[in-house]
């Protein structure tokens, strides 16, 4: 099916955008929800950890689920679970909201293994980084939509109604994907087994290959940077720099726009000769600089300068995923792209589970979100050093 045209890319891009918007909707409205429930907005880090804990388990099962029921069907169920989770998060009681976070994670987790399965079958090898990077722009596109649409909704509707509106769009997207299922899921095998062993097999596959192990470890650290940025940026700008909620949401959208452009540019650069490892090293260096610059922002920082910093931060911290996923798919055994992707994503999601709560803890202990951004600078530096070491060992 290689060279099947742009339809598989378009489908996977739209679905990726919707589940990303679903996951980031609550963090964007964290100051409002925190005030309504009389809790600290910093608890949004716990929400992100819970969602990605669910996503971690779902991603490990994703490869076998794709082979059994098909990538489109898995994606449809993911959208439905995200919608149900959003509706539960609209209930103003923390235990029910926690259950909603779990469902959103379970819906989000298998989407990337499913899309990797589709794209690995339909994309020529020499275009893998670019195509996977374009598909991964769905994550910042969805987050940008959350940052641009949700705050204005909050001005006219309640936060519960705003969550309901996003849930409705997720359900609509699941319905619209149905006509495409027959063609896209033609390779499914209804007898393929799905059991608890499915949680272990992807991890074993990753650990058995040195390059996959290294990529997984780097994604663990890079995901800490990415999700801490997207989770806390609005709250940081609103509470520490006294920037209005709508303006802070638009600033998040600027960072996401940087991620969108970055994913396409880095995919092109990696395919055209720089290579995945050197491209990721460059991105780690940009994250170090951007995290330090973000921590140095003050109320006197010109708006243009602030947005430029966030644009670069977004291009690097949100722009790395496509190059990484394409490299995983390239190095995976034949027909095992979804399983390898699920295995490495378990490490990616583990970074997300640990990163935002740790960021929130540092902000609480030191009384400022700047401490969290300085920690992200350190994590990015360690990642860059590991990538440099890997490159030297490979060249030796």
Image (cartoon, rainbow, N blue to C red):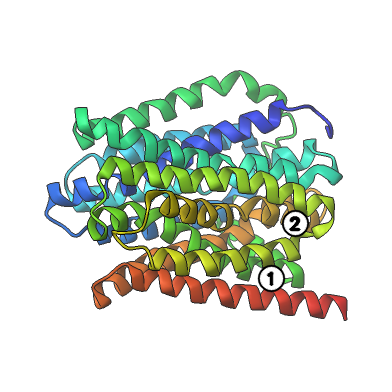
**Direction from residue 121 to residue 82 in the image, left or right:** left
Please count the marks in the image.
2
- The structure residue drawn at horizontal position 53% and vertical position 20%, both measured from the top left corner, is 176
Which residue lies at the image location 38% right of the left edge and 60% below the top edge? 49
Question: Residue drawn at (44%, 54%), measured in percent from left and top?
Answer: 305
Residue 325's x, y, as percent? 68, 53
Q: Which mark is residue 222?
A: none
Q: Tag 1, which secondary structure?
A: helix
Q: Residues within 10 Å of mark 1 (few under 14, many from 20)?
A: some
- Answer left or right for 96 relative to 311: left
Asked whether disc 2 touches disc 1, contact meaning CB atoms under 8 Å apart, the reply is no
Quadrant containing the C terminus in the rendered view: bottom right
The residue tagged 2 is 327
Can you see residue 65? no
| Mark 2 crowdedness (10 Å alpha carbons): few <14, some 14-19, many ≥20 | many
- Which residue occupies 25% across, 45% down? 244
Measured along the vertical axis of the image, is residue 369 above or below residue 314? below
In front of the other: 386 or 285: 285
Question: Would residue 249 be visible to someone looking at this image?
Answer: yes
Q: With 277 as the anchor, is 174 left or right in this view?
A: left
Query: Given this view, does label 2 or label 1 mark the residue nearer the observer?
Result: 2
| Residue hosting label 1 | 213
Q: Position of residue 147 (x, y in %)?
A: 38, 40
**How far is disc 2 from disc 1 in space, using C-alphas?**
12 Å
Determine the secondary structure under disc 2: helix
Question: Image quadrant of residue 41?
Answer: bottom left
Locate residue 235, reporting x and y percent: 29, 55
Front-most of residues 293 and 275: 293
Location of the N terminus (image quadrant): top right
Of the image marks 2 and 1, the number of the one nearer the N terminus: 1
């Amino acid at each position: 099916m290689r060279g099947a045209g742009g339809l598989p890319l378009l489908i996977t891009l739209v679905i990726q955008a919707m589940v990303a918007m679903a996951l980031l909707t609550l963090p964007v409205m964290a100051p409002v929800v925190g005030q309504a429930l009389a809790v600290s907005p910093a608890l949004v880090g716990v929400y992100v950890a819970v969602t990605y804990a669910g996503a971690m388990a779902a991603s490990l099962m994703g490869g076998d689920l794709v082979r059994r029921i098909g990538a489109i069907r898995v994606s449809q169920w993911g959208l439905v679970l995200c919608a149900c989770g959003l509706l539960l998060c609209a209930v103003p009681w923390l235990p029910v909201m926690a259950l909603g976070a779990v469902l959103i994670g379970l819906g989000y987790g298998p989407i990337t293994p499913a899309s990797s399965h589709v794209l690995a079958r339909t994309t020529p090898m020499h275009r893998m980084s670019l195509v996977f990077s374009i598909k991964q722009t769905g994550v910042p596109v969805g987050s940008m939509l959350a940052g641009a649409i949700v705050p204005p909704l909050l001005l006219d509707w309640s936060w519960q109604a705003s969550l309901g509106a996003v849930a409705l769009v997720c359900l609509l997207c699941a319905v619209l994907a149905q006509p495409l299922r027959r063609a896209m899921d033609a390779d499914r095998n209804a007898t393929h087994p799905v059991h608890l062993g499915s949680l272990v097999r992807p991890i074993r596959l990753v650990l058995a290959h040195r390059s996959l192990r290294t990529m997984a470890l780097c994604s663990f650290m890079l995901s800490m940077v990415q999700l801490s940025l997207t989770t806390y940026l609005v709250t940081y700008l609103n509470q520490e720099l006294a920037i209005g909620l709508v303006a802070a949401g638009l600033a998040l959208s600027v960072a996401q726009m940087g991620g969108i452009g970055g994913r396409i540019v880095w995919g092109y650069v990696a395919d055209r000769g720089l290579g995945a490892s050197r491209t990721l090293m460059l991105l780690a260096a940009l994250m170090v600089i951007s995290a330090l610059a973000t921590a140095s922002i003050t109320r006197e920082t010109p708006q243009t300068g602030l947005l430029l910093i966030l644009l670069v931060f977004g291009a690097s911290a949100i722009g790395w995923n496509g190059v990484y996923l394409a490299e995983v798919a390239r190095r995976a055994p034949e027909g095992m792209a979804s399983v390898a992707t699920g295995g490495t994503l378990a490490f990616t999601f583990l970074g997300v589970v640990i990163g935002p709560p740790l960021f929130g803890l540092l902000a609480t202990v030191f009384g400022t979100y700047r401490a969290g951004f300085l920690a992200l600078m350190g994590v990015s530096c360690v990642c860059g050093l590991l990538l440099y070491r890997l490159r030297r060992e490979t060249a030796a």
